[in-house]
Amino acid sequence: MENVDSPIVLEDYPASRPSMRIAVVTETWPPEVNGVAVTLAKLVQSLSQRNHDVQLIRPRQAKADAGLRDSNLEEVLMRGMPIPRYPELKLGLPSKKTLVKAWTIRRPDVVHIATEGPLGWSALQAAKVLKLPVTSDFRTNFQSYSKHYGIGWLRKPIVAYLRKFHNATACTMVPTRELQRTLGENGFLNLKVVARGVDTSLFNSNKRDPQLRASWGATDQTKVLISVGRMAPEKNLEQVLKVFDALKLLGTQMKLVMVGDGPLKEQFKQRYPEIIFPGMLAQVDLAKYYASSDLFVFPSQTETFGNVTLEALASGIPVLAFDCAAARDWVKTGVNGWLIPEDQAAEFSAKAVEIFKSETLLENVTTSTRQQIVHLDWDQIAEQVESVFRDAIRMK
């Protein structure tokens, strides 16, 4: 017989967040492997999990690409064409009329534009027609890349275009205080710092794999350097090779792993057959590569952020980098890595030699690598982005 005198149990459920309809426009998306695609996918996933309806607008990547549809995410595929010198990436073609029609039928609360190509510009114009609030991301230093491709003379027009593009939005999210300052000095308005996140459960020191190290020919005494990124001129990877040459002169047990692909890869392989070139890696494999290495070397000086810096730190390995972008915000010299002044390239190799000659420098910093960035999980980043979206909606 039921006990009618049983106490009533009251459970305290947190108030649900009001959901938004968010249109996200991008010209790059997985399986393309680059910082913009990877981090944007993580953000979209987090927004969907937080009960927002996300409409993702991107170029069709292949004939068989059908786009994803589930309860909180709908992909709308647009026409695209390969980007010059980046044939594996697509540039969205102008689509203003298509977007106006789509957003008239299914009106978003906010439009977020992650890339500034023709598709992004079309989205900006379509949103203006429909009086929709717009936010943007500044994710790629196109103006810095120009000098590496023989079009340095285009730097001023590129900056002017980007300034016009982003100043037409309610808010532009930037990943570092340094970039906020630089863009502000160049006339960019309404800038807000929102850091990139990192999957600290995926990128973790517990992914260290002795069998993987053995496949590299590395023993417990071998120090393994790792570089991760597109093998292209703007990434300054010649600096990694200078480090490698300097360390070889020490006669220490050492290996170099260079993860990634790009136009310089074959040249590097011919010049340095002893370097390990695994190519592009899936995130789960990349996590093992980071954790199985001993020092992350990141010489790029053209990044808006550099997600690989956070991935390396989360994986428990210290970082050697120039004092810029994400490294400036998250690497502390002598604590979880080493920062080199941007105008002292020779010091980069000298510091690597000092680290490898020492019995204790690597060991002393390895224990502190994760502590600076463990709070940068994607759910917290998504909460900050939500706040930017709501402010843009209120302003409209």
Image: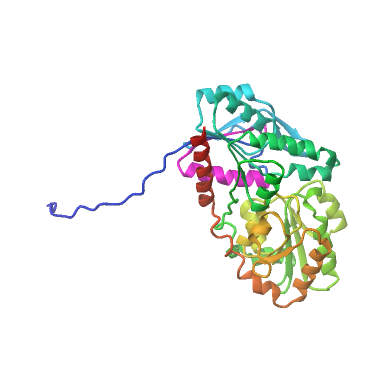
Q: Is residue 249 above or below residue 156?
A: below
**Residue 84: quarter of image:** top right
Horizontally, is 394 left or right of 169 in the view? left
Residue 135 in sight in this render: yes
Residue at figure coordinates x 81%, y 62% from the top left: 344
**Considering only vertical position in the picture, is 364 above or below 287?**
below
Residue 311: name its quadrant.
bottom right
Q: Residue at x 70, y 74 (%)?
A: 361
- x, y percentage for residue 309? 67, 57
Q: Position of residue 357 (x, y in %)?
A: 77, 75
Q: Residue at x 84, y 59 (%)?
A: 273
Q: Is residue 54 magenta?
A: yes
Foreground: 247 or 61? 247
* 50, above or below 209, in the image: above
Farthest-out residue, bottom: 359
Residue shown at 65% from the left, 28% from the top:
122
Foreground: 370 or 241? 370
Q: Which residues are magenta?
A: 34-63
